[in-house]
Amino acid sequence: MMLRSSRAASTLEAEAAPGDDARPDASRSPSSRTRTRRAKAGSTAHGSEGAGTIPRRRIPLRGRLRRDWPLLLLVLPALLQLAFFFYLPSAFSVIAFMDYSPYRPFWENPIIGFTYFQMLFQDPYFVGALINTLQFAGAQLLFVFPFSIMLALVVHGIMSTVLRSTFQSIVYLPYFFSWVLVVTIFLQVLGQDGLLSRWLVGIGAERLQIMNDPDTFMILAWMQWTWKDAGWGMIIFLAALAAINPSLYEAAAADGANRWQRLWHITLPGIRPVIVLLLILQLGGILTVGFEQYQLQRQAVGWGTAEVLDTFVYYRTILASNGESIGTAAGLFKGVIGLLLILAANNVAHRLGEQGVYQRS
Amino acid sequence: MTAQIQLFGAKKRARVRPVWDEEPSIPTKILKGLFLAVYAGAILVPIWAVVATSLASEEALTRAGGDLVLLPSDISLQAYREILSGGAVTASLLFTMLLTAIGTAVSLVLTVGAAYGLSRPGTLWHSKILTAVLVTLLFAPGMYPSYLVVQKLGLLNNMWALILPVCFSAWNLIVLRTFFMTSIPGDLIDAAKIDGAGEFTILFRIVLAMSKAILAVIGLFYAVGYWNTYFLGVLYTPGMDVKPIQVLIQQWLLASSGPTGQDAAAAAAISSGMENAPAASLKMAAVVCTIIPIVIMYPFIQRHFTKAVITGAVKG
């Protein structure tokens, strides 16, 4: 128990163990950090606290409160924020099971069970939005994600430091633009009266219709994702590439591996954990493709094309009447599926021997 | 729940092509160069076109025969003078600046407090609180329940509706908490305690003084978020007279240019009283005013963000 674990061992894994680790030293003890370390060393033993350990005398609550109140006070504002804007709305999700009307007191709304979920799946608008969402998410996964990897590989190969950092500065910039700006800029260039259209008219061709053609909206959306986010997406891969031990390449080259063989056998396995991690995160967010990009272009390409789950909920509940319960049901469906997907993807990653997003405690 | 990727070995090495690496062939080089140039051009040229148009005078636009120019034949600042001389755009820019300043301050107070308060495993209720915070990363409450809370709190059409629901991010908490726990020597805090310093003294005099760089980055990320407020503006404050700048740009530039020409009245109201500059220049000047703060903040963020992004793991 007196082992001093290194500070580096302070992963979340250790801390997620039961919190009653306080040792019976006096509250004014100068060595509260040491106590903390011991607590960590003790709790890494994965719940084996029960039988084998020395029974501990706990400091009474009042003593711990007197010792820790400044820390609790500091966390309090954030906890209040979460209570009001995470836990309270999460609790209000019960509206999905009610025949809810905003004009009645909340408790007088009758609970009717899963009726609205059944209605949801018979609703062609919801099903359409769900299919669109999955298509957009799938396209992001298939086309933007590999593009970031390819970009990182090319950029990693640039030898000149000046050229590389200049290029990086340019391609990261649009990530910080809002979707309003991105769509505006696209409209200026690719719109009917945009820069390219004018040039096309000048040489006797047709105007571009891509900004308001529902059939090519997927291509437009892909261009916008790439323009805005692909550069940013490469950061993490660049870091992973830089972390690959160069002597591996040297050894492979000495054994006669050519450029492509080195890419296949060293580079890609080297960044595999990062790829898996990002895939998990992307899978977890597969029903969350964003709101702004689609809402902004909904009018131009027609709502049926750009409708995703978030816009469906917005137009069905906030802008229409009587949609509260069905909109909440759609939101809850999205939240629960997202939760399950993250847990499942992480589980799969653990089975594949990757680290995943979080460690099991 | 934090990403457990260890990439901190990623150092900036002096880049010299190693001896074993053969020089790429000429076509490969040209192809790569072309790819990078086209990609960088696709980002820069549209931004440049926006800037150039905002600076173009009426004659320059007429001569170019359209709404967007790449090389204006003469430069005029008239569009900026018009939009910044106290109309709807000025009010909106000022409001969004205020929103960004207050929001960033609130966010930093909450994030620093939570990160420091949770940086000491073994303190009272530590793991319970930490779990309660991290759970928020796994689930997102729906849009209507959140709207209902904001409505019941009486915040609709109030600036605080754009701040309070989003002012705390568990991802930023993880980044900052990890920094507090790994980069601030525990012995230093022990020593301060022996000297009789309380938690608040330690936080303000030692911990925050040692975390200026990371606080700047987190603050800037929050600030960019507030500056880019659009969705919350549409959702919670549709009835406010002064709108966040992104909402204003949407109403002025996007909604009115749709096939149905909807919201033309709203767009006309925004540009009323601006008759001395071409409409295209005015609109592009507003876009440039929205970009400028981002471009100013950008170098500060860029210096540190790789590290911040990796520590906090990759935000979806």
Image (cartoon, coloured by chain):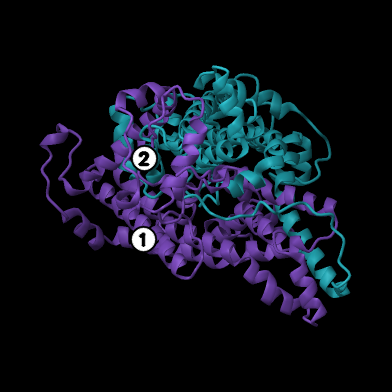
Q: Residue B134: horizontal and vertical position, in percent?
A: 41, 44
Q: In terms of secondary structure, where does tag 2 sit?
A: loop
Quadrant in which residue A63 is drawn:
top left
> Which residue lies most toward the bottom here?
A256
Q: What chain is the cyan one?
A: B
Q: For mark 2, what is the residue?
A: A19
- Report the chain holding disc 1: A
Identify the colour of chain A in the image: purple
Residue at left offset 48%, top offset 70%: A352
Q: Amino acid at mark 1?
A: Leu
Describe residue B280's horizontal placement relative to residue B226 as left or right: right
What's the mark number on residue A130?
1
What's the mark number on residue A186?
none
Q: Amino acid at mark 2?
A: Gly
- Report the chain holding disc 2: A
Describe residue A208's horizontal placement relative to residue B69 as left or right: left
Describe residue A273's horizontal placement relative to residue A40 as left or right: right
